[in-house]
Image (tube, grey):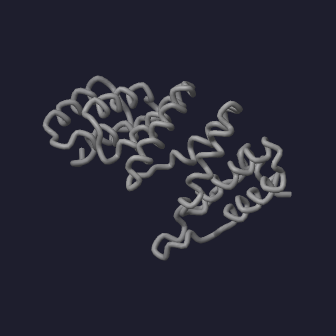
Amino acid sequence: MGRDDWYRNTTWNTEIEAKFDQKLRRAREKFQYLRIQALYLTETYPEVALRLLEQYFSLGENIDTAQAYLQRAQALSVLNDFDGAFASYEAALERERRRPNSTTQAYLDFPCLVLETKRVSLYARALEVLNTHSDRSVFPIDRFRLHGAQALLLHHFDRKDEARAEAELAMAAAQETKSGFRHHPNLGLVQSADDEFSIQVAALAV
């Protein structure tokens, strides 16, 4: 096992947990080890990820607390606890507001989950979040999600001309073939546009 493998486990059982706990007790900076290990387990062991994140939060605030809230939201989403997920995304956004130098993808993940779950009561809030952070998108995939989500939300509020304009921006981002970063030209590109979100956005761009 490599030096870093003890907090990057992709499976989990009592033996792995015991070894992780043993290493964690000896670690000086426990925050990052708990959060990173939780990240590796979010999709497959969401309950374990949540338990590790609770340990993280019990230690107090840290530089990546906003990211930990985002990960908690993702784990709760896997468990279909969408109310909990929305609350955790809001916590991530509030943390970013207070610590603007520590940002996450919550400004995109939150509105996209609102749309995915058709939580109409949160559509206005989702649009507000997107508008507040509209200047943060760096990669084509971020611009695609930003403008696509804005298009669908604006369409819901019967702002059809604005929705079409946003949809066109989203589809333009989906067609980009270079990231704009010289050393990572393929980073952050839209790899697929055949999911429900993409199909709905494309329909608005016509």
Q: Is residue 10 rendered to the left or right of residue 89? A: left
Instruction: Residue 157: name its quadrant.
Output: top right
**Residue, far left:** 26
Q: Quadrant of residue 15?
A: top left
Foreground: 20 or 157?
157
Q: Position of residue 70 (x, y in %)?
A: 46, 40
Which residue is outermost to the front? 98
Residue 124 coordinates in the image, percent (x, y): 67, 39
Q: Is residue 122 above or below residue 80?
A: below
Residue drawn at (13%, 37%) of the image: 26
Q: Position of residue 200 (x, y in %)?
A: 78, 47
The residue located at (37%, 36%) in the rendering is: 38
Vertical side of 147 occupied by 64: above or below = above
State the quadrant of the C terminus.
bottom right
Q: Residue at x 56, y 69 (%)?
A: 179
Residue 49 lies, with reference to residue 32, above or below; the image says above
Seen in the picture, residue 19 relative to 201 is either above or below; the reply is above
- Residue extending farthest to the right is 206
* In this picture, residue 128 sits left or right of residue 63: right
Q: Nearer the viewer, residue 95 or 19?
A: 95
- Residue 135, given in percent of the width and then of the height, sits at 57, 61
